[in-house]
């Protein structure tokens, strides 16, 4: 069994969840209630050695069947199997890329969101990671549900079965460490819908993300300086 303190991804903290999934190259916190990840945490590692996308979407059989998403849930739903940990962030080996296609790493995203603004943000994070002075880039993301709005779902045709709720929005929090050990933090909240707005319009404070998602982010970082950083809306890199 993996211990959180021994995982590089969790050095700055790891939120709670119903089931923690220790994959080889990322860590994921699964929600039984929402039948999808509450959060997914990674260190961006986009080294591309000429590998193609695995595209081998498959259920994650570590999750109890009654809470587990299956391929049939997404079939003809009109929603994409949207990656939380991006396939293009984990491309050094075939196995590394393949494990991003577990359905535990998927969330129902509108195609016009998943294939456009969400993908743009993923690419910009890789650009940040590629900067010469960036040592490592930590990313955590996940769904947001607004409980003052109706929640729709995909999946089961049987009314006695539980569907997969469709998130209203998604968050992504980025923690970059430079080659001098200085940390910088950016957080985003993006509606699960088409948008032509620039990425910087989705920037919010990390404290707001914590309230909306109901989790603590980077909780191993403590002190007044970190509190100020979490309350700050930093300009994009």
Image (spheres, rainbow, N blue to C red):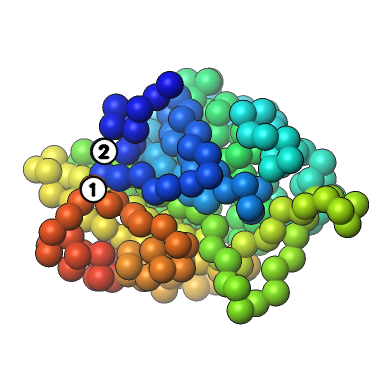
Q: Tell me which corner region of the image, top left, top right, bottom left or bottom right, holds residue 145.
A: bottom right
Q: Which residue is mark 2?
A: 11
Q: Earlier in the sequence, mark 2 or mark 1?
A: 2
Q: Residue at x 51, y 66 (%)?
A: 190
Residue in the picture at 28% in, 32% down: 5
Q: Quadrant of residue 230?
A: bottom left
**Considering the numbered disc 1 on the image, is that residue within a helix, a strand or a loop?**
loop
Quadrant holding the C terminus: bottom left
Q: Mark 1 highlights which residue? A: 220
Residue for point 18% across, 60% down? 226
Judge from the rendering whether residue 173 lies leftward or rightward of residue 169; answer left or right. left
Furthest residue in direction left, as rendered: 180
Give the image location of residue 66, x and y in percent: 73, 40
Q: Is residue 15 visible?
A: yes
Asked whether residue 84 is in view, the answer is no
- Residue extending furthest right? 158
Quadrant where the N terminus is found in the figure: top left
- How packed mark 1 is, by other alpha carbons closer than 10 Å (few <14, some 14-19, many 20 or more), is few
Q: Which one is nearer the viewer's eye here, 144 or 15? A: 15
Kindly report the distance in space between the C-alpha atoms of the residues bearing marks 2 and 1. Answer: 7 Å
Residue sitting at x 46%, y 30%: 22
| Residue sitting nearer the eye, 152 or 3 | 3
Depth check: give the residue in front, 56 or 196. Answer: 56
| Horizontal and vertical percent position of residue 125 | 38, 50
CB within 8 Å, label 2 to label 1: yes
Please tell me whether residue 100 is drawn above or below residue 190 in the rendered image: above
**Where's residue 187, x and y in %?**
36, 62
The quadrant holding residue 44 is top left
Q: Is 141 left or right of 136, judged from the image as shown?
A: right
């Amino acid at each position: 069994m993996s211990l959180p303190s021994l995982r590089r991804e969790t050095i700055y903290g790891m939120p709670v969840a119903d089931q923690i999934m220790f994959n080889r190259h990322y860590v994921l916190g699964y929600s039984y209630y929402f039948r999808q990840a509450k959060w997914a945490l990674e260190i961006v590692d986009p080294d591309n050695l000429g590998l193609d996308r695995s595209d081998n979407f498959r259920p994650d059989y570590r999750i109890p069947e009654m809470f587990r998403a299956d391929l049939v849930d997404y079939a003809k739903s009109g929603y994409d199997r949207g990656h939380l940990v991006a396939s293009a962030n984990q491309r050094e080996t075939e196995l590394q890329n393949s494990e991003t296609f577990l359905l535990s790493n998927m969330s129902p995203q509108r195609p016009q969101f998943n294939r456009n603004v969400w993908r743009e943000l993923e690419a910009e994070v890789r650009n940040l990671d590629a900067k010469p002075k960036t040592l490592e880039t930590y990313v955590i993301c996940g769904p947001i549900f607004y409980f003052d709005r109706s929640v729709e779902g995909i999946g089961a045709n049987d009314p006695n079965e539980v569907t997969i709720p469709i998130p209203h929005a998604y968050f992504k929090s980025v923690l970059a460490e430079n080659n001098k050990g200085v940390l910088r933090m950016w957080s985003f909240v993006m509606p699960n819908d088409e948008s032509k707005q620039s990425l910087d319009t989705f920037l919010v404070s990390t404290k707001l993300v914590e309230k909306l998602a109901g989790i603590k982010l980077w909780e191993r970082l403590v002190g007044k300086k970190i509190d100020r950083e979490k309350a700050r809306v930093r300009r994009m890199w």
